[in-house]
Image: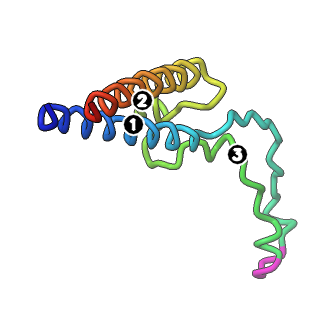
Amino acid sequence: VQQWTDRPQYLSMQCVVLLEQLSWFMECCPEDQTLNTPRTEIKPEEVELNSSTILKSLPELDPTELQYLTPMSPEQLPAACRMRKQDTMYQQLASKVKEMLVEVKAVKSDVDRIKQV
């Protein structure tokens, strides 16, 4: 019986680790930032060309332009790459991962208990 329970015990442990790591990875999803701050326009004739004025005159980066740190257009990215914590898809996925983690931990507990007998 011990050899028979070794494999399920190992697999359930691997599943727990995988789901926990997926949960931690999902925590890295960005918050939805909808800052609509207008960019400052620079008139070339008003700027003196030296390093300090050039650096000071650069427009502030709009966070909405930095949402996708990839050379691909947002339309080409998979849905998971565009996911934000407030999105319904994120909420559903986070909920499902938590449910699966509870189930797998219960199975692992059962297998551990059977192996001890």
The amino acid at mark 3 is: Pro
Secondary structure mostly seen in magenta is: loop
Q: Residue at x 81, y 52 (%)?
A: 41
Residue 32 located left or right of residue 91: right
Q: Mark 2 points at which residue?
A: 105
Secondary element under disc 2, as helix, strand or loop, is helix
3D distance between C-alphas at marks 3 and 2: 39 Å
Assess whether mark 2 and mark 1 are in contact (beta carbons under 8 angstroms): yes
Residue 17 percent across, percent down from the top left: 39, 42
Residue lying at the far front of the rendered structure: 117
The picture places residue 85, in percent across and down from the top left corner, at 63, 31
Instruction: Using the image, determine if residue 96 lies above or below residue 75.
Output: above
Mark 2, Cα crowd under 10 Å, few <14 / some 14-19 / many 20+, is: some
Give, as a single range, the part of the protein colored magenta. Answer: 48-52
- Kindly indicate whether the residue at mark 1 contacts the one at mark 3 (C-beta within 8 angstroms): no
Query: Which element is circle 3 on?
Result: helix
Name the one closer to the observer, 35 or 109: 109
Q: Which of marks 3 and 1 is in front?
A: 1
Q: Where is residue 25 in the image (x, y as percent from the top left)?
A: 50, 43
Q: In this view, does 44 lie to the left or right of 11?
A: right
- Kindly identify which residue carries mark 3: 63
Q: How far apart are marks 1 and 2 (CA)?
A: 7 Å
